[in-house]
Image (cartoon, coloured by chain):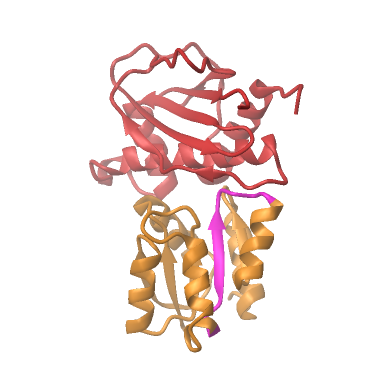
Chain colours: A red, B orange
Amino acid sequence: MSETNYDELVSGAVEAVLETMFFSSPLGPAEVESSASVMQARLAFHGRPSGTLSVCLSEPSARLLAAGFLGEDVESLTDSQPGEVVCELANMLCGALVSKLESNKSFELTSPELLPQNPLATDPETPPVARQSYELENGILTVTLRVKADA
Amino acid sequence: MALNILIVDDSPVMRAFIRKTVGLTGLDVGEYCEAQDGEHALKLLRERWMDLVLTDINMPNMNGEELVRQLESDELLRTIPVIVVSTDSSESRVQQMLALGAKGYVTKPFLPEALRDEVEKILGVPHE
């Protein structure tokens, strides 16, 4: 795909995953969250092309999403569940995205990992092809997609 | 007849989500078991009978692909239907898993109805 619209791919994946699995939807575009109290998960995909996808959202928003995902009250969540749900969100967004990048080929996805709090973490070797932020109920979700140039 | 269902996924929250989703389908479930990878799943399947396995592909230790291979190589365990529940929606992956022996494939994200329809198709059990 020489003319890939990465922003469109990210938007489509975010809407599909949030509406289908989280009973939520983006309320509109937003600025990147600068708060220190965020959760960030990242995973890599290997195929043609390869790259990484990361998601970042505020802790209150992560707890709300986790509650919707699990069908539980926010108060009844365990300490680990919001982070696990953020990882699963990254996993599903990545899966939805890479299948659109090359729908006929298989990709290998690594297991998502929670990262230290640094919402604007950079990778000087691979600048993002898309970074979009969405306003959610009680917070902002930022999705960053990096695609490596073919070797 | 109540069905015993094994859910295999390295994500505890995804196992909980699938369990909740199966609960919403109206299927008569006797016992849910959970495994975090293929190795754990095989151990459980050799200890107790399950009527259906729902498995992810991308897992540590033993992934879903190897789990399906192992089940297919076992005369008894190969009779247990396996439905793959994965983020990988590529046609090549779907065909690969079906060729290995999986009976169904559901792509994440999925609606509860998609999982229910696949389970009903495989087991021939309409929901209540």
Q: Does the magenta stretch include residue B89?
A: yes
**Left or right: residue A73 compared with residue A17:** left
- Residue occupying image coordinates x 40% and y 36%: A86
Q: In which quarter of the image is residue A40?
A: top left
Location of residue B90 in the rendering, given as x and y in whole percent from the top left corner: 67, 49
Location of residue A114 in the rendering, given as x and y in whole percent from the top left corner: 33, 34
Most foreground residue, B60 or A17:
B60
Most foreground residue, A144 or B15:
A144
Most foreground residue, A58 or A108:
A108
Which residue lies most toward the left here? A79
- Residue occupying image coordinates x 54% and y 72%: B82
Location of residue B77 in the rendering, given as x and y in whole percent from the top left corner: 48, 83
Location of residue A53 in the rendering, given as x and y in whole percent from the top left corner: 50, 30
Q: Is residue A138 magenta?
A: no
- Residue occupying image coordinates x 38% and y 51%: B11
- In the rendered view, tell whether residue A27 sits above or below residue B92: above
- Residue occupying image coordinates x 40% and y 65%: B38
Task: Report the label total.
Answer: 0
- In the rendered view, tell whether residue A18 sits above or below residue A70: above
Give the position of the C terminus of chain B as an image quadrant: bottom right
Q: Give the range drawn in magenta.
A: B79-90
